[in-house]
Amino acid sequence: MTREEFAEFLAKLKKTKKYGQDIDAFVKKNEHRNVYFYNDGCIKKILASEKNLILTTDLVNAALNLIGSDRIENPKLVNPFIPGELGYRSAEPDILLTNERKGNIPRDRISIELK
């Protein structure tokens, strides 16, 4: 699906919802087409949720090659995904994690910006 086709898909999806039609049936007709994601909302929905915090942590540890005591082990999601906020720009990062360390070691702040 091209960007233009995706825009058309979204417009038709909006009309389907507006007129109270079956959204699942509409989406099912398009389920085998590749979708063009033009914003980071889809990834944020996956990675910025408490239920996927382990996945997010593993991804950040691997991407930053964090090993041993440098690994993120006690993460807290500071700005979880909020349904309905897609498409709005803000000054905060897409995903913000904190990592509590033991002893007198300061807490880590991990800011993730999705493109």
Image (tube, rainbow, N blue to C red):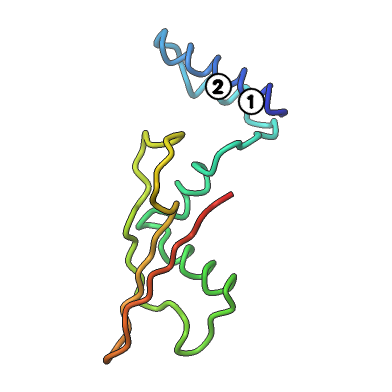
7, above or below 52, in the image: above
Helix, strand, or loop for circle 2?
Answer: helix
Front residue (pair 99, 88): 88
Please state if 33 lies on the left or on the right of 76 as rendered: right
Residue that carries the numbered disc 1 in the rendered image: 6
Q: Nearer the viewer, residue 35 or 25?
A: 35
Residue 31: x and y in percent read 63, 30
Residue 60 versus residue 96 in the image, above or below: below
Instruction: Name the residue located 60 percent from the left edge and 20 percent from the top edge.
Output: 9
Q: Furthest-bottom residue in view?
A: 103
Foreground of the two, 74 or 22: 74
The N terminus lies in which quarter of the figure? top right
What type is the residue that disc 1 sits on? Phe
At label 1, counting other C-alpha atoms closer than 10 Å, the crowd grade (few under 14, some 14-19, many 20 or more) is: some
In this view, which residue lies farthest toward the front? 91
Residue at image coords 46%, 55%: 47
